[in-house]
Every structure is written in structure tokens, then in C-alpha cells.
Amino acid sequence: MGFDGDEETATQNPKYLKSKLRFNSPFVQVSLIGLVCFCCPGMFNALSGMGGGGQVDHTAANNANTALYTTFAVFGVLGGGIYNILGPHLTLAAGCSTYILYAGSFLYYNHHKHQAFAIVAGALLGVGAGLLWAGQGAIMTSYPPAHRKGVYISLFWSIFNMGGVIGGLIPFVTNYNRSEAASVNDGTYIGFMVFMAAGTALSFAILPPSKVIREDGTRCTHIQYSNVSTEAVEIVKLFLNWKMLLIVPAAWSSNFFYTYQFNNVNATLFNLRTRGFNNVFYWGAQMLGSVMIGYLMDFSFESRRKRGIVGVCVVALLGTAIWGGGLANQRRYSIKDPLPPLDFKDSGRDFAGPFVLYFSYGLLDAMFQSMVYWVIGALADDSEILSRYVGFYKGVQSAGAAAAWQVDTQKVSYMSQLIVNWSLTTISYPLLLILVLLAVKDNHKDEEGTAKEADPTSADT
């Protein structure tokens, strides 16, 4: 995977390079990975957002998700190295195919109530998700030009979360007349599987970094495919990299809160059809949040370091306000003292407050994760390095998620879960500020130097 004579030819055709719609442009390729994630993890998010995988009993889904995020924690870290060895086609297709099996396991559970299949499918999905997200992160952070990474992150996040919007419509429409139903019907799971199969096929359209040409004529990487020994050494070094250690609290918390929001807010406060309705807006809020933070972190100031600082501070202030609203809401109910399920049509004003809160959780999630991705993308500009960085981030993130699903399975109080979530995100903000101040460079020359680093534990990193 390297340069060839085509680059010189392409560089001599400025009209060709200026077209964002050419197949080998960063815009098209980031849009394509967005569509892949629209079909696979986007639909998975819609399924998870129903609470309990759409089942009245959350136990099977909680155990499946624990298995999922346990293997995801391992293969999230390994995924960057695997992507560097196999390239995008095999890595992404293998990852996407496991989503179909996971949705199918809940279709099976609908009829047989045996959770073993769901748990095994969850473990396999953890492997596949580790591969998919490591590849996605490398593509999203390394393909765009350095000065527009925020815009491309928001482009990806908007397309990806449209999957959650459409996925939320599937259970909403198929269960609309079942306001008293507890578990979703077969058509819901089949609809998810169709989208996931389409995403698997679409993954073969993703180009390797050496074939993607930016508007200035440069390609996304100079490297050749790596080997197992090199990647093993570089992955071990990540755990000694001070930049990655500063990201750990943000990574751990960034999926930890899903369990609380999906199971203990959406699934606890609302009936079945309203959960689907809420998810349309939860994932729609993510699209809005990603655009807002992407614009702020690319266009608010000339200094890239200053943009990073402002972005972290804005998300910190918004997060404090939203979790404060969550605290006020949580004081109204508990595991032992639940509230009657709300319906978007029949509950009137009682529905408005919890709905706005759930919408706000989606907004904050997108702004928080897009901000962290921007910071990671600002640490380097090379696909090989960034695939490892993102893999580390996803691995730690998934370890946090695995712990969160078991916390809920053990019936830990809702208030305790909320306080832990709020505390984890709050701890991450000052550490991210330190990372931005020490590691994010303001001029392109410094960026290139960062991109070409070979040793992530060196004194300069």
C-alpha cells in the first residue's frame, strides 16, 4: 500500500481533485463508512435503545451485552493492528457480518427464551465490533484534511446516527398498535437484519488509505500493510503512552452511560411504542450535536489548540447541566418505587419533561464522543497511528460498557448509576484539557511531525 504513478497524474488535474464526489475523495469515503455504520451499529443502537434488546426481561440482553463488550474490550485494542494488517475490506466485512447474527439471536429468543444463543452472538459481535470501529476510526480521523477533521467527524456521526433514527422508526411503526405490548415482534428484528446485511455488502466499497486522494493531491498514508510482530509491539506501547492514559476516563465513561439511559430511563419510564418514538429523537439529537461540536472545533478560532480547549469546556458545561436535569428526574422514581409507563399520545404534559431529558442525553453523547474523536484525530495525521489510537479508545470504552451492563444486572440503584455516570464524565474534562494543551499543535508543520511519529512513548509524544 503505497504511492504510485497515479498520484502525479491526479495532482496535475486540479478540477478532478476539487470534486468532492469523486469516489476516491475523503468526502465520499467518509460518507460510505457512515452508511456502513448507519446499517450495522446504527441499527444495533436502535435495538439497544429499546431497552433489554426489545424484551420485557432485560436479563438476556444485559448478559449478551456483557459478553459483547468484554470481547469488544480486547478486540477494540487489537482491532487497530488487525486493520493495519488486513486492510479495510476484510476487516470491515468481517466486523459487519456479526451484527446480523446478534439481531437474529433475539429473533430466536422471541420464540424460545433461551439466552445462550444471544450471549454467544454477543461475544462474537464484540469481536466484530472491535474490528469495525477500529477501521471506522482510522478512516474518519485520517482520511480528511487536518484542518477539517471536525467537519468530517460530524458528517460521519450524522449519517451513522440516521441509522438510529430509521432504526427507531422500525419498532415504532411495527409496534404502534401494541401500546401494552412488552416485547417487540419478529418483524422488528427482521427489519434490523436486512439493514445489517446491506451494510456488510457496502463495506467492500471502502478504499484503502493509499488510494484516497485529498483535494491538495496528497494521499492519506505512505505506509505498506503492517505485520503481526510490529502491531503487537505497538499495541503494547499504547498502554505506556501518556496521551492514551489521559483519554482513559473519557473512553471508559463514553459508553458506560448507555445502560442507564436505555434501560433505566427509556425502558423504565415509557411504554414500548414510545421507546421507539423516543429513539428517533435521541439519535436525531446526536446528528444535531455532532454538527454543532464539529463546527465549533473546526471554525471557532484560528488556533487549533484554542478550538480544542473551547470545545472541551462547552461540552463540560452542557454535560453538567444535562446530568443535573437527570438528577432532578431520577429523584421521582427508583427500582422499588417505579412510575406508570408514559405514552407519547396519552400522557400529556407528564411526557414532556422525561422526553426532553432523553433527547438531551442523545445530544450530549454525540458532542462528547465527537469532541474526543477530534482530540484523538489532532494527535496524529496518519492512518496507521490513528487506527491504534482509536482501537485503544474503543477497547477501554467497551470495557466500561461491559462493567455497566453487569452493574444494571446486579440491580444497583438508579441514583447510584446516575451519580457514577456523572462523576466519570466530569473527571474526564480536566484530563482532556491537559491533553489538548500539551499535545495538540497549532501549525501544520507540527501536525506533520506528530503524524510521522514512530514511537508513541517517546519524550515528544
Image: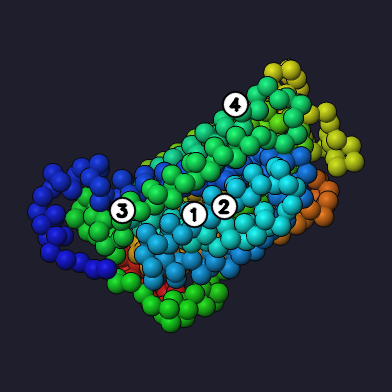
Of the image marks 4 and 3, the number of the one nearer the N terminus? 3
The colour scheme is rainbow
Between the residue at mark 3 and the residue at mark 1, the CA separation in whole angstroms equals 30 Å
Between the residue at mark 1 and the residue at mark 2, the CA separation in whole angstroms equals 7 Å
- In the visual, does 135 lie left or right of 420? left
Q: Nearer the viewer, mark 2 or mark 3?
A: 2
* Snapshot quadrant of residue 357: top right
Residue under the image location 25 percent in, 43 percent down: 20
Image quadrant for the C terminus? bottom left
In the rendered structure, find residue 97 and report the number of the disc placed on it. Answer: 1
In the rendered structure, find residue 145 and report the number of the disc placed on it. Answer: 3
Of the image marks 2 and 3, the number of the one nearer the N terminus? 2
- In the visual, does 351 lie left or right of 103? right
Please name the residue that numbered disc 4 is placed on.
173
Q: Position of residue 155 (x, y in %)?
A: 40, 42
Please name the residue that numbered disc 2 is placed on.
101
Q: Nearer the viewer, residue 257 or 318?
A: 257
User: Can residue 435 be seen in the rendering of this structure?
Assistant: no
User: Can residue 461 be seen in the rendering of this structure?
Assistant: yes
Q: Label 1 neighbourhood size at 10 Å, few (<14), some (14-19), many (20+)?
A: many
Between the residue at mark 4 and the residue at mark 3, the CA separation in whole angstroms equals 41 Å
Residue under the image location 31 percent in, 53 percent down: 145
Between the residue at mark 2 and the residue at mark 3, the CA separation in whole angstroms equals 36 Å
Q: Nearer the viewer, mark 4 or mark 3?
A: 4
Residue under the image location 27 percent in, 68 percent down: 1
Dot 2 falls on a residue whose secondary structure is: helix
